[in-house]
């Protein structure tokens, strides 16, 4: 299964041609990862919230994808392990720099809000999460995480397959952004996509999208579907830009449309409070491929994540649906144990998954991987990522994991 990363509206699409993008998109079948047929406007979401609202006390899952391979060892820091300091003499955090969780582990200094959640027992850290025969490729590894199929590529994502089994309403799952990730593509149903980007003619990105949406008589049938999807992206951008100018009662006017994680989660909070009939929300942030100057770069990124999650929880504080929300943050892989010559880290394997909310068990799940018993310089996974999904399907979405996952695991007890 081919995969493309989400578009970054702040960056030009350097090196990405119409031909290569259409080819990549066609590879996943019927333009599945694109907004296309599943594109929705803010007005449509609010109409459904008013006419078919989500029943009270219905659990909601918010998935936060961190693209680039976040370094788990400098996120949940084994500050008391001598092997950590030996492997990263200039990149390791000193004990006094981290936010202590216990006498062995601490959080990155940028994660102050998550440290508070830990004290409230509203944060579960799943340690050593990975999959068999790990792949160091961003694209393949993220495909594996999002399709939940490590053995061989498949053309559907785990949330998409849940959608198929849940009745096929696209708005049961909502991606915030123009391009749907593979996780949101089912066999018969594709999740809805809500664009954050208003139409602004003249930018390199919009010019590129316009080019991708231009009909070419040489296109194959699959490519024509992709082209139609990009045309739909343009339409939803225009519609949402108009919705932003609506009266404050729409609850969307406070959003600065920049596409940052804080903005995405603010929109999710607005949807939840309005009663949108959505059980799963997908948001994302890139920039975690820290091959150089990691200590500064990663802390900046993690601080963004922390502030966005803290603001999200603050937006829901006191609302009847606050207790319904479980938020999960993950990345496609961790990094290697040893620092490289550029004071960064290279692509690795096992890492941490954060599960947050009032309903979580709190504390650690899974064994901390050894920093000396390695697999060719990589951490050995102690928890299969599909076990995490199984708990979320079972305890948050009320679904049978056997209908979604290719392998079953004993429950981890993530949800209290």
Image: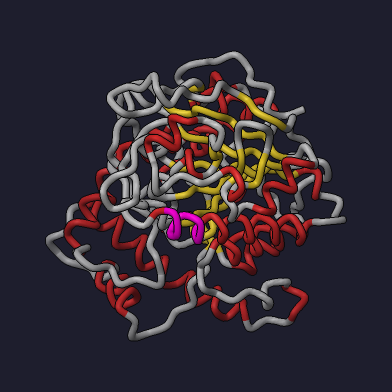
- Return the residue nearer the eye: 112 or 402: 112
Tally the marks.
0
Residue under the point 65% across and 55% down: 309
Residue 35 visible: no
Residue 122 visible: yes
| Coordinates of residue 257 in the picture (x, y in percent) | 55, 74
Quadrant of the drawing holding the N terminus? top left
Residue under the point 36% across and 22% down: 374
| Vertical position of residue 72 compared to residue 257: above or below | above
| Coordinates of residue 205 in the picture (x, y in percent) | 33, 74
For residue 319, what is the image quadrant?
bottom right
- Return the residue nearer the eye: 324 or 285: 285
Quadrant of the drawing holding the C terminus? top right
Left or right side of 366 for 6: left
Left or right side of 144 for 50: right
| Vertical position of residue 143 compared to residue 199: above or below | above
The range drawn in magenta is: 295-301
Left or right side of 142 for 366: right
| Coordinates of residue 212 in the picture (x, y in percent) | 26, 67
Query: Magenta segment: does it hold 288?
Result: no
- Return the residue nearer the eye: 121 or 272: 121
Residue under the point 48% across and 38% down: 73
Residue under the point 20% across and 51% down: 23
| Coordinates of residue 160 in the picture (x, y in percent) | 49, 38
Residue occupying the far bottom of the picture:
202
| Vertical position of residue 381 compared to residue 195: above or below | above
- The overriding secondary structure of the stretch rendered in magenta is helix
**What coloring was used for the rendering?**
secondary structure
For residue 60, what is the image quadrant?
top right
């Amino acid at each position: 299964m081919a995969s493309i990363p989400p578009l970054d509206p702040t960056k030009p699409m350097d090196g990405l041609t119409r031909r290569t993008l259409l080819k990549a998109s066609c590879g996943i079948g019927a333009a599945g990862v694109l907004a296309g047929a599943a594109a929705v406007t803010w007005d449509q979401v609010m109409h459904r919230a008013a006419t078919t609202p989500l029943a009270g006390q219905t659990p909601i899952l918010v998935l936060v994808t961190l693209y680039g391979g976040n370094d788990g060892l400098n996120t949940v820091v084994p500050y008391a392990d001598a092997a950590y300091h030996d492997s990263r003499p200039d990149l390791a955090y000193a004990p006094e720099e981290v936010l202590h969780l216990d006498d062995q582990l601490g959080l990155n200094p940028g994660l102050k809000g998550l440290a508070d959640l830990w004290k409230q027992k509203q944060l579960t850290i799943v340690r050593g999460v990975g999959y068999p025969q790990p792949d160091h490729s961003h694209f393949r590894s993220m495909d594996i995480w999002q399709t939940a199929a490590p053995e061989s590529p498949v053309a559907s994502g785990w949330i998409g397959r849940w959608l198929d089994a849940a009745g096929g309403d696209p708005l049961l799952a909502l991606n915030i952004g123009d391009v749907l990730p593979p996780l949101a593509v089912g066999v018969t149903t594709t999740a809805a996509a809500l664009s954050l980007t208003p139409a602004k003619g003249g930018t390199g990105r919009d010019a590129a999208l316009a080019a991708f949406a231009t009909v070419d008589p040489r296109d194959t049938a699959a490519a024509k579907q992709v082209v139609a999807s990009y045309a739909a992206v343009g339409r939803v951008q225009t519609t949402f830009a108009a919705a932003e100018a609506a009266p404050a009662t729409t609850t969307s006017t406070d959003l600065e449309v920049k596409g940052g994680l804080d903005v995405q989660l603010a929109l999710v909070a607005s949807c939840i409070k309005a009663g949108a009939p959505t059980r799963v929300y997908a948001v994302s942030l890139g920039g975690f491929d820290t091959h150089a100057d990691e200590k500064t770069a990663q802390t900046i990124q993690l601080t963004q994540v922390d502030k966005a999650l803290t603001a999200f929880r603050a937006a829901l504080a006191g609302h009847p649906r606050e207790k319904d929300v479980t938020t999960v943050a993950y990345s496609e892989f961790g990094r290697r144990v040893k620092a490289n010559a550029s004071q960064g880290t290279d692509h690795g394997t096992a890492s941490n998954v954060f599960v947050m909310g009032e309903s979580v068990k709190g504390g650690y799940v899974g064994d901390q991987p050894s920093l000396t018993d390695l697999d060719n310089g990589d951490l050995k996974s102690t928890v299969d990522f599909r076990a995490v999904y199984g708990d979320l399907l079972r305890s948050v979405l009320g679904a049978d994991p056997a209908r979604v996952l290719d392998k079953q695991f004993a429950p981890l007890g993530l949800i209290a």
